[in-house]
Image (cartoon, rainbow, N blue to C red):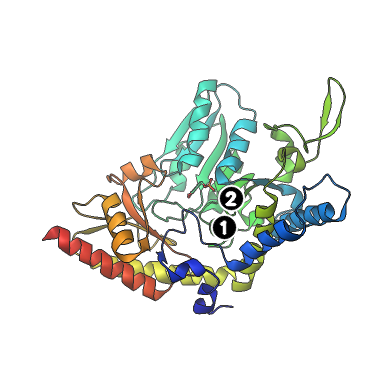
Amino acid sequence: MNNIEQVRSDFPILNDLIYLDSASTSLTPKQVVEAMNEYYFRYNANIGRGAYRIAIEASNKVEESRGKIAKFINAKENEIIFTKNTTEAINTVANGLNFEKGDNICLSNIEHHSNLIPWLNLKQKGIKVNIIQANSEGIVEKENIKENINNRTKLIAITHISNSIGSIQDVEAIGKIAHENNSLFLVDGAQSLGHVKVNLKKINADFMAFPGHKGLLGPVGTGFLYLKEDISNELKTINLGGGTITNVEEENFSLENVPQRFEAGTLNISGIIGLNTAVDYINKIKVSNIEKHCAYLTKKIWDKLSKIEGLILYGSEKNTHGIVSFNIDGINSYDVAKILDETRDICVRSGFHCAIPGIKHLNANGTVRVSVHYYNNMSDVEKLANSTEEIAKVFSS
Ligand SMILES: Cc1ncc(COP(=O)(O)O)c(C=O)c1O
């Protein structure tokens, strides 16, 4: 299973192109697609409702997936709330917490918009947002956090791995600072899950937001929120309806337990079933092997790109995981990505990567972003580096 070429054969799309944009969404292995198809072809029914066999089978599969995810991040089953993506998980917290006028929230300036806009939106309610500047390597320094919090800091919300330059935050240490200050702690795990070990017992976050469709190799339209059991009653449900109540009378209703009270309406059942298979797939490869392989490829990309004349690399080689951001002097990042796609079938992301303040902080007007997963190999790295060098040469001559 750990043979990269064997793993690549599970991703037929790789026959046609070089995919270096897994930070946006990863490719999906055949096994995950087959699990979703099986649901549609054999036991396509709604969950938590029907008494007939296929409805029970679908319900059990969804709960099996919840259990597997909980184990994967060292949490309890009732701490996992299914969402459609990371963004929805963060919004569930931002709109469900009880803030009082004068409270403040602490964030960094390199957050993805999904961990920025939901908090900025609370300014209308009189909530202050303190933005901490990351250092030149994209690290949010502990001293800087301590200086920016006070007894009205309700929450510190930080990304684990930056999606623009790949810098990794010491979330365990930041969590300690938050809790010593009696603040809640939210981690955006969009880029870390599946890429590095995520252990909620160690990180001790109160909330952690995750995608199913990135590092986990699950389907699009899947994600989840980790909500620490001890504080789950602090969060109001924002979406109410079918599935969220235990009883209704004409003018009253009583809420279901957590997590069901946060999962209103019909869920993405096939996606969650695909996620179940995705976790098995990742467990077979092992996160430690993914981390090692992606660190190796990242280093090789960094080494090769750094030798190209006129190329600017962002962040720090020492502190990046799976993501390399760069520009070719004098060329728009969009044009570089377009040329790589149209002339070499190489898919990379360009622009601001939904992190406009963070990219502007680098004094860049967008970057080209390369991001890897376990299915990438050295041939991908070499083709990327050679093609980038050719583009740089053409535009500098
Ligand atoms: C750090 C980070 N946070 C949040 C998101 C949003 O994720 P989703 O598309 O799952 O909502 C992304 C997506 O790229 C991300 O990289």
Q: Secondary structure at mark 1?
A: loop
Which of 345 and 183 lies nearest the eye of the viewer?
345
Q: Which mark is residue 193?
A: 1
Residue 346 lies left or right of residue 194; in this view the side is left
Q: Residue furthest left?
A: 397
Residue type for callout 2: Phe
Q: Is residue 23 above or below residue 143?
A: below
293 to the left or right of 52: left
What's the CA distance linking mark 1 and mark 2?
A: 7 Å
Image quadrant in which the N terminus is located: bottom right
Query: Label 1 sits on what residue type?
Result: Leu
Tell me if 72 is positioned left or right of 64 in this view. Answer: left
Which part of the image, by quadrant, shows the C terminus? bottom left
With respect to residue 86, does 124 lie above or below? above
Residue drawn at x 46%, y 53% as measured from the top left: 24
Instruction: List x then y, in percent, for residue 85.
Output: 58, 46
Q: Secondary structure at mark 2?
A: strand
